[in-house]
């Protein structure tokens, strides 16, 4: 192990939260399952960043959150990394991090992005079988902020307790309510009310963050910043009969075709190329699609020719698809002559399919290519390094949560719920109420799960006053959905985050 990046297990201790378990029901009442105790396992480590050593504590444990009846209804698992020797909490930010799904635990962000340890993968190739390598993360954010990784209810080791069930958490608003309760509880137990606070969500975690920022603000907890990684703020964009999806995906298709050298005349500058594609998408392409089947044949030919030049797909295929190609068909078609399919989370990944002639990929090589490495390494890390062992099963993805998820969302103050989440408005509401709140949108150019052009559209339609628009900034990386899998992108991400935190903590 290199001397410049050192992490050492120095000792461990077991702590239990101050609050005792709630009393069990009396014999006359309907008896609910026993409430587990809160507990935490603390270990001590050291990490070297840029030649400077940082001693920190890692706390793996659970906190109970109470329902509306003031009785516990959830036990939430978390791992917190806190810098040792800090005497004034006001000088030390704390960041709450989580993945999305909905229904995903947070091991992906935890073990791949800005935590003190990082799993080494072969991205953009499949990582394969164990043993896997885990190294001190020289791009950790621990020098800028304490980090609290949270597993959503019914994922990881987080569980409903008492009379609660998965359905009490499986919904857009139910989920945010639970996260707000956990963050409030963590801040109270650890005396962090006056620390600068950040939310850091990936994928559906950005949906959660956008409403959560407003929810916490309404409860009296103002935030310094929100990091949106690989963002989805509007589920209506994929509604049948709407062309927004095809317009929004086009620049990502172009970026992926550029990466795989499938363009007839590959431009040398991808940034300038994507600016050209953006202009075509929001202008000529969107206008053409708006005419539907009434688009004149000559214009069909002209649009198909331009789409082909930007995406690498054939003119004939594009015309047969009525100029509208969804992301599964793109993933199958771009590399068809090579008998390869592309990843959804990351279009750089390639794989082979059982049927090269089909129009739908059989799986996502960008997911299967790294899942085994993350799941196995995280289990090993919890037991070997963090000394956390329990008899329960760790759920990387909550069983059947998506099937029972309540997609409806009622923004604060609304009289009627939305059928599906639209949360850019909630984030805008939080910014208006807290004009110091800053938002950092980080995007992978090759992400087919949450395309950057759709994110740009949603964040530019929050109807903010000019003086507040500068609160939102963007960054782009040569990566997919999980930006940190590209180590060069992770290095730049850390530098960008350091600047963002400095600005948000002024």
Image (cartoon, rainbow, N blue to C red):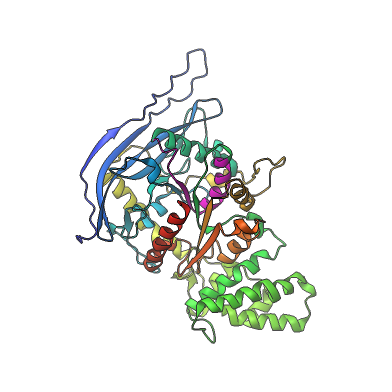
Residue range in magenta is 191-217
Closer-to-camera residue (393/479): 479
Q: Please, is residue 356 above or below residue 192 in the view?
A: below
Q: What percent of the width, then of the height, locates residue 2?
A: 20, 61
Is 319 left or right of 263, judged from the image as shown? right
Is 237 left or right of 400, judged from the image as shown? right
Closer-to-camera residue (392/181): 181
**Residue under the image location 56 percent in, 75 percent down:** 274
Q: Residue furthest bottom?
A: 265
Q: Is residue 198 magenta?
A: yes
Is residue 170 visible from the viewing direction of this image? no
**Residue under the image location 61 percent in, 57 percent down:** 467
Q: In which quadrant will I find the N terminus? A: bottom left
Figure quadrant of residue 111: bottom left
Q: Please, is residue 495 above or below residue 196 in the view?
A: below
Q: What percent of the width, then of the height, locates residue 394?
A: 39, 44
**Residue under the image location 54 percent in, 87 percent down:** 265
Is residue 382 visible from the viewing direction of this image? yes
């Amino acid at each position: 192990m290199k001397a410049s990046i050192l992490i050492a297990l120095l000792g461990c201790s077991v702590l239990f939260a101050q609050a005792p378990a709630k009393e069990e029901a009396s014999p006359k009442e309907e008896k609910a399952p026993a409430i587990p105790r809160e507990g935490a396992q603390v270990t001590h480590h050291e990490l070297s960043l840029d030649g400077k050593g940082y001693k920190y504590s890692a706390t793996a444990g659970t906190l109970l959150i109470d329902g509306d009846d003031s009785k516990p209804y959830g036990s939430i698992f978390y791992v917190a990394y806190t810098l040792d020797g800090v005497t004034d909490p006001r000088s030390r930010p704390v960041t709450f991090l989580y993945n999305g799904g909905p229904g995903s635990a947070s091991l992906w962000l935890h073990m791949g992005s800005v935590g003190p340890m990082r799993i080494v993968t072969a991205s953009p190739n499949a990582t394969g079988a164990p043993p896997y390598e885990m190294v001190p993360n020289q791009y950790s954010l621990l020098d800028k902020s304490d980090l609290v990784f949270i597993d959503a209810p019914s994922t990881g080791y987080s569980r409903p307790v008492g009379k609660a069930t998965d359905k009490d958490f499986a919904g857009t608003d139910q989920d945010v309510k639970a996260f707000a309760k956990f963050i409030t509880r963590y801040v109270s137990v650890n005396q962090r009310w006056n620390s600068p606070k950040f939310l850091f969500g990936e994928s559906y975690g950005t949906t959660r963050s956008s409403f959560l920022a407003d929810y916490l603000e309404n409860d009296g907890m103002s935030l310094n910043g929100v990091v949106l990684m690989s963002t989805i703020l509007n589920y209506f964009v994929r509604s049948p009969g709407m062309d927004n999806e095809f317009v929004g995906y086009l620049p990502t298709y172009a970026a992926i075709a550029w990466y795989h050298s499938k363009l007839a005349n590959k431009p040398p500058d991808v940034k300038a190329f994507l600016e050209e594609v953006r202009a075509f998408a929001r202008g000529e392409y969107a206008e053409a699609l708006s005419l539907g089947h009434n688009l004149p044949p000559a214009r069909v030919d002209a649009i198909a020719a331009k789409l082909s030049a930007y995406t690498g797909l054939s003119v004939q295929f594009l015309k047969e698809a009525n100029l509208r190609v969804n992301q599964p068909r793109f993933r199958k078609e771009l590399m068809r002559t090579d008998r390869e399919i592309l990843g959804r989370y990351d279009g750089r990944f390639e794989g082979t399919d059982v049927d090269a002639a089909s129009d739908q990929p059989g799986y996502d090589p960008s997911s299967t290519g790294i899942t085994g490495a993350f799941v196995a390494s995280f289990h090993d890390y919890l037991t070997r390094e963090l000394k956390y062992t329990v008899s329960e099963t760790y759920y990387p993805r909550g069983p059947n949560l998506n099937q029972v998820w309540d997609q409806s969302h009622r923004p604060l103050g609304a009289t009627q719920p939305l059928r599906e989440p639209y949360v850019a408005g909630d984030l805008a509401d939080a910014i208006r109420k807290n004009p110091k709140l800053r938002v950092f949108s980080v995007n992978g150019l090759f992400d087919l799960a949450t395309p950057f052009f759709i994110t740009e559209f949603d964040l530019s339609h929050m109807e903010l006053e000019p003086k507040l628009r500068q609160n939102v900034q963007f960054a782009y990386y040569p990566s997919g959905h999980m930006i940190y899998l590209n180590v060069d992108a992770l290095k730049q991400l850390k530098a960008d985050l350091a600047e963002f935190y400095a600005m948000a903590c002024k």
